[in-house]
Image (cartoon, coloured by chain):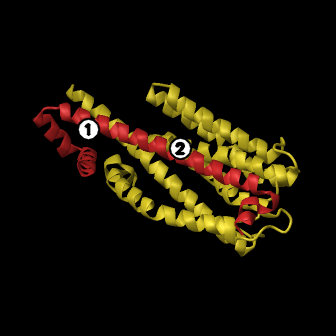
Chain colours: A yellow, B red
Amino acid sequence: MFKFFAQSNVYFFIEKIIKFINSIFFLILIIGLTFSLILSPPDFLQGDSVRIMYVHVPSAWIGLACFSFIAILSIFNFIFKIKNFYFINKSLAPIGLLFTCLAIVTGSLWGKPTWGTWWAWDARLTSMVVLMFFYFFFLLTIKFITNQQLANKVSSIIAIVGSINLPIIKYSVEWWSTLHQPASIKISGSSTIHSSMLLPLLAMLLVFLLYCALIFLMKYKTEIIRIKKKTLKKYD
Amino acid sequence: MIENLIHMNGYGLFVWLSFGLVLVSCSLVYLKAKKTLNKYEKEYLAELKTLSENEKNEVLTNSKVAQQVLATNSKAN
């Protein structure tokens, strides 16, 4: 099963997927921006500031999803010792960090007109900052520990420990009294968001996901070349 | 209509700053990733060229990645 993830098998398809994403990306970006900035209605309470949701929510989802994925692969890496998972994690972490930071900053920009403050140390915001620090530690480990095996082990431990924070982020708005509103979109149960706002949100989510896939594939491709470059050294 | 789009009933600064920030940071990360990828591809190709003909053939036979990098670079040139 894990042979599917072999670098030589995957590399062949990366170029094609990158080209495909490049060909559709701008069209979907324009559709997403048109819906979120022009066509979607203002909120009856928050007015036009609600449009920040279209970049804030997908950023937060992707930040969380990337870390969940990294944590799961880290557990598999511990059990099955698959080196490739380390490279996948290494390529995913910067994307997760970028979107976690964007979620925090855009959240702050949304907070000022809505709550009257840029920042509050409430449970949801604080747990997102904790997630950002876990991403930082994860990336610092990979960057500064030169022994790859050790870096793999330490970064996996950071990811697994950091995964404890994920349910805290998710349920913080239910467990504690927070400024942050509860989730409007639920996987199980009915969502409280109107379809005129849900559609632009999903369009922007698709844009962000395509962007993530593009960056991930470019970074993963770089990792593969870096490894193959090392194998050339035996001819020196 | 355009004035409405810019001002957004007083929320324009926050909305445009959010979208602008996302756009700028995503573009920077994209450019950085592309630059690093190009750099590694060029370095790999340069190292491949320093090998003798026999070694090069051996690498190209055994490595799909080497074939792909060479093919992509040939197309780009």
Query: Which residue is pictured at 66% across the width and 47% down the height?
Result: A102
CA neighbours of label 2 inside 10 A, class few (<14), some (14 to 19), many (20+): few
Q: Secondary structure at mark 2?
A: helix
Query: Which residue is pictured at 46% across the width and 43% down the height?
Result: B33
Q: Secondary structure at mark 1?
A: helix
- Residue A92 appears in the figure: no
Q: Of circles 2 and 1, which is in front?
A: 2
- Residue A100 appears in the figure: yes
Q: Nearer the viewer, residue B54 or A42?
A: A42
In the rendered view of the protein, which quadrant contains the C terminus of chain A? top left
* Chain letter, disc 1 residue: B
Label 2 belongs to which residue?
A: B28
Residue A145 percent across, percent down from the top left = 50, 25
Q: Amino acid at mark 2?
A: Leu
CA neighbours of label 1 inside 10 A, class few (<14), some (14 to 19), many (20+): some
Label 1 belongs to which residue?
A: B45
The tag earlier along the polypeptide, 2 or 1, is: 2
Question: What is the number of the mark on residue B33?
Answer: none
Residue B3 percent across, percent down from the top left = 73, 64
Residue A13 percent across, percent down from the top left = 35, 56
User: Gap in Å between the C-alphas at discs 2 and 1?
Assistant: 26 Å
Query: Which residue is pictured at 85% across the width and 45% down the height?
Result: A117
Please state if A119 lies on the left or on the right of A34 as rendered. Answer: right
Occupied quadrant, residue A61: bottom right
Q: Amino acid at mark 1?
A: Leu
